[in-house]
Amino acid sequence: MTFGERIYLPAILKGLRITVGHIFRKPATVKYPEEKRPFSPVFRGLHVLNRDEEGRERCTACGLCALACPAEAITMEAAERKPGEEHLYREEKYAAKYEINMLRCIFCGYCEEACPKDAVYLSETVMPSNYTRRSFIYKKEDLLIPHPKKQEQAG
Amino acid sequence: MLLLQIDWAFILEKLILIAVILGASFGVAAYATWGERKVAAVMQDRIGPDRAGPFGLLQPLADGLKLFFKEEIIPDRSTRTVFILAPALFMLTALMTSAVIPWGPDIITANGHISLQVADINIGILYIFGVVSVGVYGIMLGGWASNNKYSLLSSIRAASQAISYELALGLSLIALLMATGSLSMTEIVKQQHGFWDGGWFTWYFFKQPLGFLIFLVCSFAELNRAPFDMPEAESELNMGYHLEYSSMKLGMFLFAEYINMFITSAVLATLFFGGYNFPFMDNVSAWLQDVLPVAHSAVFAAICVLVLLTKIVGFILFFMFIRWTLPRFRYDQLMNLGWKSLIPLALVNMIITGAVILWVFKS
């Protein structure tokens, strides 16, 4: 080692110049939740259960999404459409109970790909945090999008 | 009768001064933890803590409360008394050194002088040096009392590092003493009055540059601070002397390190950078006597204390910059540096200082 290398001091000063130079640069931090990073159009976030143009639920409780889910997060119970409920559901079978356990879900999007009725979509929303495990089991009411005609004000 | 013979004013004055200095030490050390995280962050292109209060200023409070609320675990087969004593000893020696540092010039009041130094003993530097040496006991006892092989090894390494660098520290101080002729801290600060005395700078940084460099490097090693933080790193990487500690005892170890940093910066500023002296201080003092005939001495003392605190903050920032820049020394590299490089260098410094005083100044 040369004398200049052995006394360590020139190397220390060079290092200090680099790190002190970094003080005057803009930080790379994104201050969530005030600022958000832009997501790509295919970002997989929270699930939504879709409705058609007249406001009827698309989901028919066929169970393909539950079968496709690698984490077994989706459970459902089917029910038959009664004669007076045509405006609520598209087909004769509908999901009376539809639950997704968000703690199991890995947001892979297989349920979205498997659905034959275009009922389940993964939206851009990031999952919010919560305190109990029970509150992470999202029921059908939490997942359905608002009715396009009746709840326009609320949406 | 005894009660009337005791000088209550003196005791009260000293107690208030001690309380203020202790409060300031704790405050500066707490915000040094905040400052460390912020400085580390800006050097790494990110923002530090900024959620706990505006700019994260309540973060030290949050950390302190967290440590208080944690569970105290004392290992079953450890030596209980020594286990609890070690962090207390470390904290005690860290706080004791603040007693001899002159924080400002005397305040001249109608009744007499109020000294801003708790104890003006005439062996000031030797006292600081002695107390810092006793501080090594805190680390040693902490590792020993943990009843853990790895803690013991780590504390042995920490102690050997401390005593190796204390030698070079003492030798560089001897060269300084040859130049000052006195061990008393007030005397040393008085000799550095102003900034320029017509011939050369008055501050000892310009008269003893090599001594300053050696003292600075050795103080990094005494503080267990990067690049000499082998004891601290071990506790993060593998084990360390504060492995078995939890809750506030761990808090004492960590906090006492920051208080040590504060006090070492104060000692460095006092010995080499003029303490509370600043350029044109006589002009400022004369101006204040014209403007405020009543309280000029107190205002001047306040300005001097602020100047000293600025120098201390500058040194603390320098310590932090070095920590987040340099990689850690390996243990054998550290020992080589201490024994084979710094001690001969300090001896050479002593010889040069002696030669210069003898032949150039002819005194």
Image: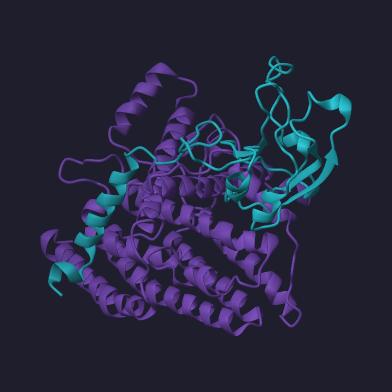
Answer above or below: position of B308 versus B122: above
Say which residue appears at 45% left-offset and 19% top-offset: B293
Say if residue B161 shows up in the picture. yes
Q: Quadrant of the C terminus of chain B?
A: bottom left
Q: Quadrant of residue A98?
A: top right
Q: Is residue B153 left or right of residue B88?
A: left
The structure's colour scheme is by chain
Q: Is residue A38 left or right of residue A109?
A: left
Q: Is residue B234 left or right of residue A16?
A: right
Answer above or below: position of A128 versus A82: below
Q: Which residue occupies the foreground of this view, B279 or A104?
A: A104
Colour cyan maps to chain: A
Image coords of residue B258 (percent x, y): 52, 55
Image coords of residue B344 (percent x, y): 24, 77
Q: Residue furthest top?
A: A153
Q: Which residue occupies the foreground of this view, B33 or A46?
A: A46
Say which residue appears at 69% left-offset and 44% top-offset: B8
Say if residue B23 shows up in the picture. no
Answer above or below: position of B35 versus A146: below
Answer above or below: position of A98 versus B343: above
Q: How many marks?
A: 0
Q: Quadrant of residue B76?
A: bottom right
Q: Quadrant of residue B268?
A: bottom left
Image coords of residue B15 (percent x, y): 64, 46
Image coords of residue A68 (percent x, y): 64, 54
Q: Which residue occupies the foreground of this view, B112 or B25?
A: B25
In the rendered structure, the colour chosen for chain B is purple
Q: Is residue B110 left or right of residue A132?
A: left
